[in-house]
């Protein structure tokens, strides 16, 4: 009998390659929605396919699936992903990953208003191009192929407490 293991195994950085996290916000009738896109550049030792498999392992290690739709992290306190807002920057933490991002002032305002941001953690590698091009980021993040290969999480934005 064969079974699939759900055991968490470490994600090797050489297999993953470069994992990038980028912020952007999108206007909606209800105000701006702050997003974080996390994906590999596909530059792991086994190329884009190996990087994709490593991100899939990271998704699994987080207790997520690319098939479950939007997950509200506030209802899953054991979820090992967090978002910390410190002044004008943010820290995204996942197993083996800490990413510091300096988002736009609009993004910080949007997360303050909503109290959360939407993380799109996709197994689809970045197709190339300028990582500072907000339109390219939004186009990639909103592409059906990217979203079909992504775990999507509404992350509460935590702040350091004043003493």
Image (cartoon, grey):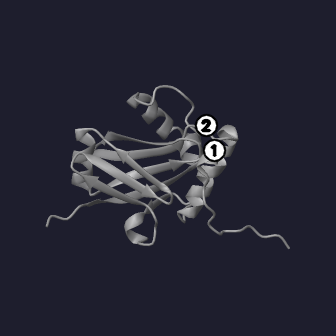
| Residue drawn where x is 55% and y is 36% of the image | 126
Q: Quadrant of residue 9?
A: bottom right
Count residues near mark 1 (Cα–Cα under 10 Å), then give few for <14, some for 14-19, many for 20+.
many
| Residue drawn where x is 33% and y is 41% of the image | 25
Q: Position of residue 104 (x, y in %)?
A: 27, 38
For marks 2 and 1, the one nearer the N-term is: 2
Q: Is residue 12 above or below residue 64?
A: above
Q: In this view, does 137 lie above or below 52?
A: above
Relative to the observer, which residue lies in front, 144 or 128? 128
Q: Where is residue 62 in the image (x, y as percent from the top left)?
A: 53, 63
Specify whether residue 30 is in view: no
Count residues near mark 2 (Cα–Cα under 10 Å), then give few for <14, some for 14-19, many for 20+.
many
Tell me the CA gap for discs 2 and 1: 7 Å
Specify whether residue 46 is in view: yes
- Identify the element where label 1 is drawn: helix
Q: Position of residue 112 (x, y in %)?
A: 22, 53
Task: Say left or right for 52 vs 33.
Answer: right
- Identify the element where label 2 is drawn: loop
Q: Are marks 2 and 1 in contact (CB under 8 Å)?
A: yes
| Residue drawn where x is 65% and y is 69% of the image | 7
Residue extending furthest toward the right: 1
Task: Say left or right for 125 vs 117.
Answer: right
Residue labelled with disc 1: 51
Residue labelled with disc 2: 43
Q: Position of residue 99 (x, y in %)?
A: 41, 49
Q: Dividing the image into 4 quarters, which one contains the C terminus? A: bottom left
């Amino acid at each position: 009998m064969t079974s699939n293991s759900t055991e968490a195994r470490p994600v090797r950085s050489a297999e993953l390659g470069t994992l990038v996290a980028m912020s952007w916000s999108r206007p909606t009738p209800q105000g701006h929605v702050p997003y974080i896109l996390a994906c590999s550049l596909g530059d792991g030792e086994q190329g884009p396919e190996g990087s994709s498999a490593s991100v899939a392992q990271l998704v699994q290690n987080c207790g997520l699936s690319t098939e479950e739709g939007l997950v509200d992290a506030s209802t899953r306190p054991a979820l090992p992903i967090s978002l910390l807002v410190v002044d004008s920057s943010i820290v995204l933490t996942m197993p083996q990953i800490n990413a510091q991002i300096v988002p736009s002032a609009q993004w910080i305002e949007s997360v303050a208003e909503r109290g959360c941001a939407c993380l799109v953690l996709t197994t689809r590698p970045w197709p190339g191009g300028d990582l500072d091009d907000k339109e390219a980021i939004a186009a990639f993040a909103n592409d059906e192929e990217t979203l079909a290969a992504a775990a999507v999480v509404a992350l509460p934005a935590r702040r350091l407490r004043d003493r």
